[in-house]
Amino acid sequence: MRGIAVREHFKTMEGGHVSADDAGAILGISKVAVLDRHRKGNLLGWRAAQDAVRLPVWQFSEEGVIRGLNEVLEAWKGMAHLDDWAKVLFFLSPLDNLRNVSPLNLLRKGQVKKVVELARAYAE
């Protein structure tokens, strides 16, 4: 039960989540293109009711996706042990060694290289 409560909390953080249709509108691409990017590991999302994909809003910016997201996701390619939720938790969880700053906030500050290093260590 605790795991379900944690997931529900993380679903609502940093703007919540949107459907693949809504993500397509944000990115200026089709729903099919959004789902393809998610399937290839280039967008974060999770499977919800009736197998629909939900995507966290915080990964989007006015330019498309937040700067550095692609580099972090690329660092995780081929690491099947990291599921969608492990990736979401990584971005949103404050880290003790970063004075309780989350990797997402580091990306927003432009610290892409640092977040990629943290992501690689997280995957090990």
Image (cartoon, rainbow, N blue to C red):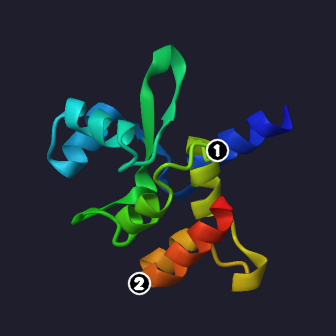
Q: Residue at 46%, 76% (x, y): give it.
A: 107
**Label 2, residues with CA under 10 Å away: few <14, some 14-19, many ≥20:** some
The residue sitting at 23% across, 40% down in the picture is: 24
Relative placement, left or right, of 113 versus 121 is left
Report whether residue 109 is seen: no
Q: Is residue 124 left or right of residue 42?
A: right
Q: Classify residue 124 by image quadrant.
A: bottom right
Q: Nearer the viewer, residue 10 or 71?
A: 71
Q: Which mark is residue 110?
A: 2
Q: Position of residue 116 (x, y in %)?
A: 50, 73
Q: CA distance from mark 2 to mark 1?
A: 27 Å
On screen, residue 97 versus residue 59, left or right, reads right
Secondary element type, mark 2 = loop
Instruction: Give the vertical position of 91 relative to 42 (above or below).
Output: below
| Residue 8 circle label | none
Q: Residues within 10 Å of mark 1 (few under 14, many from 20)?
A: few
- Report the residue at 31% width, 34% height from top: 35
Which of the marked residues, 2 or 1, is nearer the chain's N terminus? 1
Q: Amino acid at mark 2?
A: Gly
Residue that carries the numbered disc 1 in the rendered image: 81
Percent across and percent down for residue 12 are 58, 47
